[in-house]
Image (spheres, helix red, strand yellow):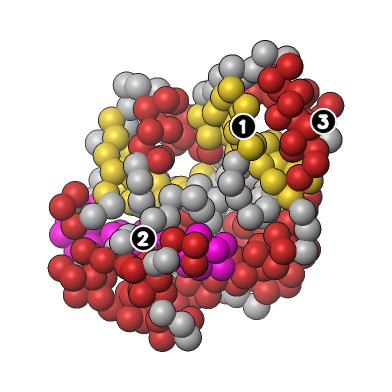
Amino acid sequence: MTTALMFSGQGAQKVGMGKDLYENSEIARSHYDKADEILGWKLSELSFEGPQESLTETKVCQPALFVHGMAMFEILKSQGKLGDVSIAMGLSLGEVTALTAAGVFDFETGLKVVAERGRLMQEACEASKGSMAAVIGVERDVVASFCEEMDVQMANLNCPGQIVISGEKDKIVAAVAAGKEKGFRRVMELDVAGAYHSRLMEPARERFASYLESVSFQEPSYTIFTNTTGKEVSEPTAIREALVKQVVSSVLWEDCLVNAAAAGADLFWELGVGGVLKGQVKRTNKDWANASFETWADL
């Protein structure tokens, strides 16, 4: 078997995430305690106890999902269960988790990178008036033309028939109304803080690029598929460029899955919250073997 690891993106977070890992694993305790120390605020408390409103903030949920994913990764690794892993990838912020698991950064550096990413994206959200909408059951090329017509962008291409669009609030509201008029199977505005993976994130992209200039990148020990192209990326400079571009560009998650399978992945393991990625694997190809690891009971 060749296993591909998948790490969660923003939106998967929920109160209580990681609590049973912390209670049952010294490895998880070490990760959460170290994260609290590095960040200077209680990530563990917000992850385990909430409130949901605070955990959902971009600057909080991004590092929270990173620490959960890395704790689960290190636990599975210590149990000798990752011997068949040769591919790693993540949805949006999960790409930083995948890179850290692959040794591009150490845990402390990866945490700082994702915390800065989340902080800058939250600032960009607060400085603009953006929104997002889900478009269900519509072909990719049709959505691409529709976005051009409505002057919005495709933010996430998650799996067949599941695309998220992003842009200025008034344009997303207009797109939802127009999509319904066109007879799209389902189009609905999402409850989000801003227009992620769109031009409204340009201030965050610019400042994130400056921040990453001082961060050292290593060659990954796993094959990495990047959201920006859906293709493999391995050279440290190219990885840095992809992370910067990803802030404003479409997340080609379906392409990552398809290309991982083409590269030999025959088992997809989600190390994250809520089983979201596992569901997207099933919708992309029901024959691909998959599993999700969220809690201690899943181990």
Image: 107 above or below 18:
below
Q: Residue at x 84, y 26 (%)?
A: 149
Question: How far across and how far down the image is residue 163, in percent?
Answer: 60, 31
- On the image, numbered disc 2 is attached to which residue? 15
Going from N to C along the chain, the mark reached first, 3 or 1, is 3
Q: Amino acid at mark 3?
A: Met
- Dot 3 crowding, Cα within 10 Å, few <14, some 14–19, many 20+: some
* Residue 139 vertical placement versus 256 (above, below): above
Q: Earlier in the sequence, mark 2 or mark 3?
A: 2
Picture coordinates of residue 26 (x, y %)? 19, 75
Q: Is residue 220 visible?
A: no
In the picture, which quadrant includes the N terminus? Answer: top left
Asked if disc 3 and disc 1 are in contact, CB closer than 8 Å, the reply is no
Query: What residue is rendered at 31% in x and 61% in y?
Result: 16
Front residue of this view, candidates 282 and 49: 49
> In this picture, which residue range is highlighted in magenta?
55-82
Q: Which mark is residue 150?
A: 3
Badge nearest the viewer, 3 or 1 = 1
Q: Nearer the viewer, residue 158 or 219?
A: 158
Q: Secondary structure at mark 3?
A: helix
Examine the image and state in which quarter residue 123 appears: bottom right
Whether pointer 2 and pointer 1 mark residues with C-beta atoms closer than 8 Å, the reply is no
**Main secondary structure along the magenta-highlighted residues:** helix
Specify the amino acid type for callout 2: Val
Q: CA distance from mark 2 to mark 1?
A: 25 Å
Label 1, on which residue? 188
Instruction: Tell me the distance, in whole angstroms, between the alpha carbons under discs 2 and 3.
Output: 36 Å
Within-10-Å neighbours for mark 1: few <14, some 14–19, many 20+: some
Question: Which amino acid is tagged 1?
Answer: Met
Q: Which residue is painted at 73% across and 56% down in the image?
A: 201
User: Magenta span has 161?
Assistant: no
